[in-house]
Image: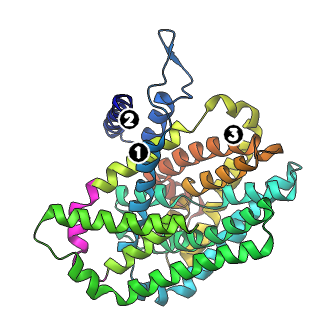
Amino acid sequence: MAELLLEVGIAVTGVALAGMLAGRIGLSVIPAYILVGVLLGPNAPTALFGVPVALVNEGEVIDVLAELGVVFLLFFLGLEFSVDQLLRDRRKISAVGVLDFVVNFGIGAAIGLAFGWTLVETLFLAGIVYISSSAVVTKSLIETGWIANEESSPILGTLVFEDILIAVYLALLAAITGGGGLRAAATSVGVAFLFLGGLSVVAWYGAGWFERFFKTGSDEQFVLRVVGLTTVVAGAALALGVSEAVAAFFLGTGLSQTTHVERIEHIVAPARDLFAAVFFFAIGLSTDVTLLAGVAGLLAVAVVATTAGKLLSGTLSGRVYGLDQRRSLRVGLGLVPRGEFSLVLVALAASIGTGRLGSVIPAFAVGYVLVMSVVGSVLVDRADGITDAVLSVTGTDSRG
């Protein structure tokens, strides 16, 4: 117990120092949190006075805290929506979601086939590079204040579509690779949609119940009820094979219709930020930089091609929402980061353990997530300068 407590203390302190340094040099905290995870984790590339710097190991405590980071980032994302808004914007969300899938999944499939991979290996690679990180993107939107801007709508719409689609995709891949066949896949997908459908109904009709349940004068009781209910819903979803992040999102949409939103954002936000920081730290812990040399060529191609892909699909998605050129470019920049769902696909590939699925894909994916998390965060942080430069070159500058 003492060792676990010490590791958690080192992790949180390391994250705090990294965030302080990032603030002083004017960078996003996200890449700082990830990089300190690399430096303090079991795969640290350096040694201090001949002693390996492996102060924090991957374990259940860090994993659970990191999982809560994803859950609460998506829960807060749901607070920005309502079921009414999702239904009202369903055609736009579907349009940008399909556009995003065709462009970015297509690029991933093309890369896999170009490198001579099998169909199953290519399906894993395409899934890894296709889906943006809801956690990283949401954190970036909150950190930069974009969450209140017009470009947040197509970004959030794309994330919602991706998160629902990836739940289906994971079920299909698990059935294909596990030998369960189409029946197993159909059952898994059916359970996922029944759960999410039921949660949507609760979100739609349960505003009055939520209003009463969270009504209390005690901040302590309020935080306990929000954290408790959100964690229970996310855990139930995960137990049924449904994305816990998507479940937390729909719960957030339910609470968005109550009068408690401002109080949640004020009182529960610090807990969200703590859990989210551990999530980004955990990405660093899982990254073994010594394995990246063997996949450097594939990694370079994927980073360049898929960054361009998200910029293209995001910019077009902004136009679907009627945004001007500047804001549309910012949509593309905002969707570049990859993260948690890519790592979930890696875990499934590694469990198979044959051929590239057990060796190349895990090494590629952790490096890819690390690079894209850092690149994506920097692009958002430097969005104004980038859009100014692009619009100046194209001669289509328009302020928005």
Percent from the top left, x then y, of residue 216? 14, 73
Dot 2 falls on a residue whose secondary structure is: helix
What is the crowding at mark 2: few (fewer than 14 residues within 10 Å), some, or many (at least 20)? many
Lower position in the chain sequence, tag 2 or tag 3? 2
On residue 363, the disc is: 3
The residue that disc 2 covers is 11
Q: CA distance from mark 2 to mark 3?
A: 23 Å
Viewer-nearest residue: 191 or 144: 191
**Does the stretch in magenta take in 103?**
no
What amino acid does circle 2 point to?
Answer: Ala
Lower position in the chain sequence, tag 1 or tag 3? 1
Percent from the top left, x then y, of residue 276? 39, 51
On residue 278, the disc is: 1
Residue shown at 10% from the left, 70% from the top:
217
Q: Which residues are magenta?
A: 257-270
- Is label 2 in contact with label 3 (beta carbons under 8 Å)? no
Dot 3 falls on a residue whose secondary structure is: helix
What is the crowding at mark 3: few (fewer than 14 residues within 10 Å), some, or many (at least 20)? many
What amino acid does circle 1 point to?
Answer: Val
- Is label 1 in contact with label 2 (beta carbons under 8 Å)? yes
Q: Horizontal placement of 89 versus 353: left or right?
A: left
**Does the stretch in magenta take in 260?**
yes
Lower position in the chain sequence, tag 1 or tag 2? 2
Residue shown at 50% from the left, 30% from the top:
41
Q: In the orientation shown, which residue stands out farthest toward the front?
A: 1
Q: In the orientation shown, which residue stands out farthest toward the top?
A: 49
What amino acid does circle 3 point to?
Answer: Ala
